[in-house]
Amino acid sequence: MTAYPSSKAIIGAAASPLHVIIIGGGIGGLALAQGLKKLGVSVAVYERDRTRTDRVQGYRVHINPAGSLALHECLPPPLFGKRSGGIRFLTEQMKMLLSLDLADAPDVLREEGIAQHRSVSRITLRQVLLSGLDHVVQFGKTFTHYQEGVSGRVIAHFDDGTTAEGDILVAADGGGSRVRRQFLPGARRIDTGVVGIAGKVFLDDKTRPRLAPELLQGLNLVSAKGGLALFVALQELGSDMVGEIGGNDESAGSSAHFDNTKSYLMWAFGAQRTTLGVGGDVDALDGASLRAIALKAMAGWDERLKSLVRLAHADTINAIPIRSSVPVAPWPTRRITLLGDAIHSMTPYRGIGANVALKDAGRLCRALTAADRGDRPVLDAIHGYEAEMLDYGFRAVRGSLRAMEQAIPNNGLRLFVSRTLFRIVDRVPLFKRWMFRGIGDE
């Protein structure tokens, strides 16, 4: 069996006392790797994607002030993306319920600085987080299982027969985490019964004139009769930003023919499976079928909203069953730990999943750096991180479930009450500032 070289061998004599293995190269895992590398801690990331351009599906990420601070802590000079624009809550007939813009924000959020609400393409953010990690991230490595050696070190096994050995193993491999299945076999995720169908409209001289101008400004959220919801967000990509999938790499998949430096308008439509009349295999349906399902459910909606679904290229439309983690009790601390969706995956309806993963990365980076420097025992450092993470992580899970229930009202009374509250808030500046402060918080 061939052992894959650790980054200790790569960086040589200056390597740190600890070597950290991260399974998964998503936002949380890469942010942790950036932070550890920045502080001189030996780290290696093992990612199942074959290349850095394999993951072509992805949409907008909202980075809240806490997420911005975590990025600043982990990254060398970071690329944040543009500050978020306004947020509008609409009916399915495009009637305004509530409008929030930067003028409604508390003073601290109107000022320029690090701790701001920001908007960035998920794929662009991943490419930024990969910058400078050429000798840290190993692609084409599908994790199968781990072993704990008698010396206290952990050995990760991959499906190509190779292994990697380190002092600490971090699961950053998403909601379907194989590390979690082995480490915490009792940890569960539930299917909420809600399905999300999402797509992109790439913006050019042909598509922009066909879209309602108000949809090209910041975020728009619709909660509609019948338990339906729509999220619409603009993602403007400037020439100074990293391209979403980089060049014309043929390995990038079916969307490689798109010019992924183009700005786009993304939409995400959500409803219960029973409302949409779809079974358990909705994620296997093609884009054209998903478009038809969404348009059928949106019959009677304003044509300006339906045009989003019609204009999206079928190759960008996919569906995701919305799942959520069940809280787990604390476990005996070992040299294996978890971050992000690998432990506390949540619904997308608060827009905070990436921010909580970044928060995990920042706090775990601090803990492991302290252990690496000998300031704290390794297990004590990991235990401190896990105790905090389980508290705020599953609090965020609960909040995202509540937000989903509010966005997809199961009865007319709840929808009436929420719309009435939005209209009241829209008329009271103090309420608007309070609501703006809470957007995106865990």
Image (cartoon, helix red, strand yellow):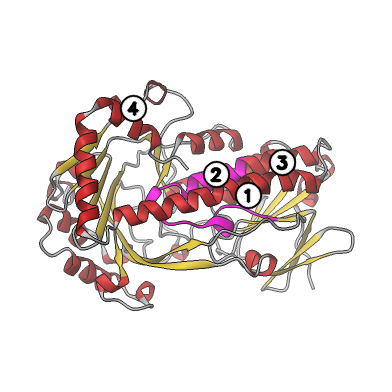
Q: Which residue is mark 1?
A: 134
The N terminus, quarter of image:
bottom right
Tag nearer the camera, 1 or 3: 3
Q: Secondary structure at mark 4?
A: loop
Tag nearer the camera, 1 or 2: 2
C-alpha separation, residue under disc 4 versus residue under disc 1 = 40 Å
Q: Residue at x 27, y 58 (%)?
A: 409
Do callouts 4 and 1 mark residues in contact (Cβ within 8 Å)? no
Do callouts 2 and 3 mark residues in contact (Cβ within 8 Å)? no
Residue 384 image point, x, y percent: 71, 43
Residue 38, picture quadrant: top right
Q: Which mark is residue 53?
A: none
C-alpha separation, residue under disc 4 versus residue under disc 3 = 33 Å
C-alpha separation, residue under disc 1 versus residue under disc 3 = 24 Å
Q: Residue at x 85, y 64 (%)?
A: 149
Q: Which residues are magenta?
A: 337-362
C-alpha separation, residue under disc 2 versus residue under disc 3 = 14 Å
Q: Which residue is mark 4?
A: 105
Residue 167 image point, x, y percent: 80, 53
Q: Which mark is residue 367?
A: 3
Q: How many marks?
A: 4
- Whichever of callouts 4 and 1 sits on the residue coming sooner in the sequence is 4
User: Residue extending furthest right?
Assistant: 151
Please, is residue 328 above or below residue 88 in the view? Answer: below
Q: Secondary structure at mark 2?
A: helix
